[in-house]
Image: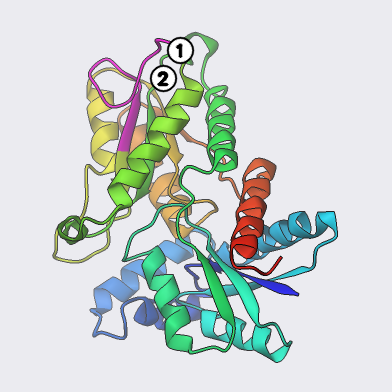
Amino acid sequence: MIGVLVMAYGGPNTLDEVDPYLLDVRGYRPTAAHIMHEVRERYRAIGGRSPILERTRAQAAAIEAALNSDGQCYKAFIGMRHWQPFIKGALGEMAGLGIHCAVGLVMAPHYSRMSIGAYFKKIDEAQSPVEVARIEHWHLLPGYLDALAERVRTALERFPAGIRADAPVIFTAHSLPQRILEWNDPYPDELRATVAAVVQRLSSPGGKGAGGEGERYFFAFQSAAMTPDPWLGPDAGEVIARLAHEGHKHILLAPVGFVCEHVEILYDVDIVFKRQAESLGVQLERIDMLNTAPLMIAGLAGLVRGKAREAGWL
């Protein structure tokens, strides 16, 4: 049997879990009371909990089913970076079942040393007897890109028919501290590559491209943390304000750096950005998150099979 370690960020299941979860995120550094309060109120505003665990479980189950559809024997396990069930515990569960090899997959498509790299560092720190073959990049996975393009086309139908062809689309991803640029970190380049590939799928030959004057496709970061150091920009809120000032009344936001609902989607987008847009007289919509989109799941199953074959396990 081959294990599949499906990893995600983690999130609190109740309001009582917010403070210890945030302490884990911040490496147990002293955290100001107003920050703890602010984060707790954000979770309160989205229902008092994060849905990330059940969303990731559903993704893992779908990947496992796709892998086993051809008679193979894979078993998926969930490991969260900052909350239960932790990555170390998932590896221990595998070892207890006699699984000696597993493919590690983070449910985030774009590599950064501060993001994907940190998940695999947790695996190293666990010192597990399970050998883990690593999938570190999948920002150009065709199934992921096709699913995103499909979500954008569907979401544009929420706008009046006459403006769909020209409505601005803002692709977003989680911001990271600007210091990653000093490391030649691939994160910004991988995001640009994803956006270009999705735009290519959406645009007719000779159609409008991304990021220039008079064009309809843009990229922005979102959800910068409450820290004093500078974070990557521009922020999506700035782009929304600029487009509104230019006279746009319908804007679509497409988070490409997330594949399920996080607080960054349910609060930062669905509450903060939508409230901003309403104040500017703009109809802001966002794409449905990919979650268990069949195209993406099939693509990820193919990546796992390929990595297991590369490791000599098939």
Q: Report the residue at 14% width, 63% height from top.
A: 229
Q: Which residues are magenta?
A: 205-219
Q: Is residue 1 above or below residue 247?
A: below
Q: Are marks 1 and 2 in contact (CB under 8 Å)?
A: yes
Kindly give the residue lying farthest to the front in the view shown. Answer: 312
Q: Is residue 68 above or below residue 265?
A: below
**Residue 29 is drawn in which quadrant?**
bottom left
Distance between the alpha carbons at the discs numbered 1 and 2: 6 Å
Q: Is residue 207 above or below residue 152?
A: above
Q: Which residue is mark 1?
A: 163
Q: Position of residue 168 (x, y in %)?
A: 37, 23
Lateral position of residue 273 relative to residue 180, left or right: right
Q: Give the number of the disc on residue 167.
A: 2
Q: Report the residue at 82% width, 55% height from top.
A: 69
Q: Residues within 10 Å of mark 2 (few under 14, many from 20)?
A: some
Total marks placed: 2
Give the amino acid type for the residue marked by disc 2 in the picture.
Ala
Q: Position of residue 157 (x, y in %)?
A: 57, 22
